[in-house]
């Protein structure tokens, strides 16, 4: 009989999975160099769990399902946890069903009747970092340890002390507690992670795959001087060993108490009733997941009453009173089918990965950026490879690496083309720069298309109805050759195009007409001058007042504009030095584009209500949109920034304001609502 016995197949697969999982666990926990995304690891883990429960005889003591993995590294002193550091059971059903299943289990374990009142829960975020136990004695931080295998971790006190958010001495009642072990998560904010990778790249050092790996690497860095350069953050979420303190009777109360002692506790948490409360929390956080300043992979529900927690107890190493409820993964594995080169507005050539479509971070992704040829080489990806795709927040999906493994056949390394794939102009690279550029300028249709799309953008000339499909037709059909050509378009010509009805053609012509009346700042931004974003365009418009004054300005004069440095000044000067660009400007003016001009900064020097002030917007305001609020603030002389720091003067918070509001409170920054903002704009407040 040649057919394999089903149990023999199961045994073979189980052995294979054990080996695979142990290998990846070692890479992940011991070496901090994972090759698999978590979701893939979890999938294999669950496959093994399922096999073992269907065939209990396959269970072996060395199965990764039988222990909490991780090993003490040679370089750190082992620390025994008097109270073990537990893990949490994961509810993988990412729908509302996950929350309902947990609540049903809790009610069953507590032997509650169907008509008993709902169970009260504490709901929190599941931070994607690594677990740390902080030991305070009489309020002084004496030791910090990693979780290790849950029983024994590593002493990482030196590195943890470098984390500014972690108090070296507690405040309030914390100072009087004999022993207080605080459990929580060390993590890295997304912006800190980006900045760190930027620095690593600039130095030619290796970049990190994701914030969690960067955080884990920093905590277990043997040289604390290096650890100090890695920007880490911390949130407390529970207790370990305790003596000399009677904690409040609920988990929510414990977290409040910890916050009261000066420990960072995430404000995105809630005390809720029953399954419905959990479902609402899961959904509310899902809606804001991309806006959070750090990665989470789910939420955590905990039975709020500590008394009920004691009654529920544990199964092996997982408490019955807590569960992690996941969200769809932000990293997935898929196959790299090809690499195409895209030409951007400034001619920059970007290698773009063509992927076997994969569901990641909530959408199906089939294209992902590979940034530039140097990044691509460093990651070592080649067509045909299994690659890891990451899509976190609203950032463009990217390929972060490949799953090592043999290749079916020799695949040549990717090379940047020497000629632009769109216009065949020479491709150039600035000395020492990372980027390749098409030298065709606006003669390159790809650049022309991007330039037109940018010009028409909402924050530029705001020409509604001029989308990429239409621009493709206009440029490819040689109907529009440059920006001024847009204003020669007539209804008949447009209506003859694919997918254009009379009505949409009329609407577009009306939108073009309407766009003619604009502001100097919008016009400057719309021109797409390199280095000139919206804010610089506004500063230039305010400073020079008149377009001709700006066009004639020397580099020295440009340097007088606030926030304009040598690189930006040179870019502006170079742009207007080109006769071709001047011609475009003249033709646009001839087509009827107009804006109000004034005599420049001198006449505009009267102090405005928000001159010199930096504001941060967060949440949804009752009547103003984000853009409207931004425009009002800028018109009043203020600046709008994306993140809260000590330099922020005001945070304007609306409905569903998140971590920016917490940060404001933490730093003591004034918080306003919409009415407060409006008062401030009037010069009151
Ligand atoms: S509580 C008894 N709360 O998830 C439960 N853990 O497997 C002990 N984690 O490595 C953990 N956010 O580091 C808890 N709000 C949170 C958490 C959280 C992230 C991590 C924790 C641990 C893993 C649990």
Image (tube, rainbow, N blue to C red):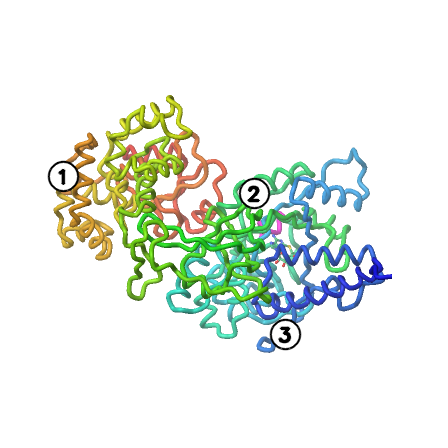
Q: Residue furthest right?
A: 1
Q: What secondary structure is found at the residue carrying circle 2? A: helix
Q: Is 53 drawn above or below residue 471 in the view shown?
A: below
- What's the magenta region? 252-257
**Residue 190: % across, % down:** 47, 54
The residue indicated by pointer 3 is 78
x 49%, y 74%: residue: 223
Image quadrant in which you'd find residue 102 = top right
Q: Main secondary structure of the magenta part?
A: helix
> Quadrant location of the N terminus?
bottom right
Sequence-wise, which precedes: disc 3 or disc 1? 3
Residue 285, label in figure: 2
Is 383 contained in the magenta span? no
**Residue 208: % across, % down:** 49, 63
Q: Residues within 10 Å of mark 1 (few under 14, many from 20)?
A: few
Q: Can the viewer see residue 135?
A: yes
> Quadrant location of the C terminus?
top left
Sequence-wise, which precedes: disc 2 or disc 3? 3
Left or right side of 216 for 198? left
The residue nearer to you, when weighing 673 against 594, is 594
Q: Residues within 10 Å of mark 2 (few under 14, many from 20)?
A: many
The residue indicated by pointer 1 is 603
């Amino acid at each position: 009989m040649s057919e394999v016995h089903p149990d023999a197949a199961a045994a073979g697969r189980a052995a294979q999975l054990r080996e695979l999982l142990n290998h990846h666990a070692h890479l992940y926990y011991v070496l901090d160099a994972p090759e698999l995304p978590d979701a893939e690891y979890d999938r294999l883990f669950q496959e093994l769990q399922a096999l073992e429960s269907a065939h209990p005889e396959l269970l072996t003591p060395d199965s990764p399902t039988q222990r909490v993995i991780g090993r003490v590294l040679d370089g750190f002193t082992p620390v025994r946890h008097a109270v073990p550091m537990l893990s949490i059971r994961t509810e993988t059903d990412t729908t509302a069903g996950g929350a309902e299943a947990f609540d049903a289990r809790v009610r069953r374990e507590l032997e509650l009747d169907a008509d008993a009142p709902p169970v009260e829960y504490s709901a929190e975020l599941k931070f994607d970092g690594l677990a740390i136990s902080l030991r305070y004695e009489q309020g002084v931080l004496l030791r910090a340890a990693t979780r290790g295998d849950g029983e024994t971790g590593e002493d990482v006190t030196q590195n943890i002390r470098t984390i500014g958010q972690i108090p070296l001495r507690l405040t309030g009642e914390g100072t009087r507690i004999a022993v207080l072990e605080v459990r929580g998560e060390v993590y890295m904010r997304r912006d800190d992670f980006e900045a760190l990778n930027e620095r690593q790249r600039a130095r030619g050092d290796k970049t990190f795959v994701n914030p969690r790996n960067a955080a884990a690497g920093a905590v277990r860095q043997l040289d604390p001087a290096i650890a100090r350069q890695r920007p880490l953050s911390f949130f407390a979420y529970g207790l370990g060993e305790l003596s000399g303190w009677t904690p409040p009777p609920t988990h929510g109360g414990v977290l409040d108490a910890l916050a009261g002692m000066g420990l960072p506790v995430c404000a995105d948490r809630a005390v809720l009733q029953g399954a419905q409360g959990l479902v609402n929390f899961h959904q509310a956080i899902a809606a804001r997941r991309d806006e959070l300043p750090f990665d989470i992979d789910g939420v955590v529900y905990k039975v709020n009453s500590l008394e009920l927690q004691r009654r529920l107890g544990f199964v092996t190493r997982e408490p019955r009173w807590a569960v992690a409820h996941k969200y769809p993964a932000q990293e997935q594995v898929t196959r790299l089918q090809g690499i195409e080169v895209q030409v951007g507005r400034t001619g920059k050539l970007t290698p773009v990965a063509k992927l076997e479509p994969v569901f990641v971070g909530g959408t199906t992704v089939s294209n992902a950026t590979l940034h530039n040829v140097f990044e691509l080489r460093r990651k070592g990806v080649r067509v045909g490879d299994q690659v890891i795709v990451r899509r976190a927040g609203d950032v463009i999906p990217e390929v972060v690496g490949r799953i090592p493994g043999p290749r079916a056949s020799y695949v040549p390394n990717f090379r940047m083309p020497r000629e632009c794939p769109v216009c065949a102009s020479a491709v150039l690279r600035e000395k020492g720069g990372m980027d390749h550029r098409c030298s065709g300028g606006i003669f390159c249709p790809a650049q022309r298309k991007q330039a037109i799309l940018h010009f028409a953008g909402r924050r530029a000339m705001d020409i509604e109805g001029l989308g990429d499909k239409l621009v493709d037709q206009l440029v490819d059909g040689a109907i529009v050759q440059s920006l001024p050509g847009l204003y020669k378009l007539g209804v008949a010509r447009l209506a003859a195009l694919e997918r254009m009805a009379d009505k949409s053609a009329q609407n577009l012509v009306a939108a073009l007409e309407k766009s003619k009346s604009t502001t100097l700042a919008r016009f400057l931004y719309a021109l797409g001058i390199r280095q000139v974003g919206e804010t610089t365009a506004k500063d230039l418009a305010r400073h020079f007042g008149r377009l001709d004054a700006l066009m004639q300005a020397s580099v020295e004069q440009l340097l007088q504009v606030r926030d304009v440095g040598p690189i930006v000044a040179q870019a502006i000067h170079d742009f207007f030095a080109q006769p071709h660009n001047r011609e475009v400007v003249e033709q646009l003016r001839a087509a009827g584009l107009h804006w109000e001009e004034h005599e420049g900064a001198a006449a505009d020097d009267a102090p405005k209500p928000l001159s010199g002030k930096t504001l941060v917007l967060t949440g949804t305001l009752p009547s103003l949109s984000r853009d409207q609020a931004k425009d009002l603030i800028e018109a009043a002389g203020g600046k709008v920034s994306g993140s809260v720091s000590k330099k922020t003067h005001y945070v304007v918070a609306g409905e569903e304001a998140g971590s920016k509001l917490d940060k404001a409170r933490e730093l003591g920054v004034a918080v306003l609502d919409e009415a407060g903002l409006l008062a401030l704009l009037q010069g009151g407040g």
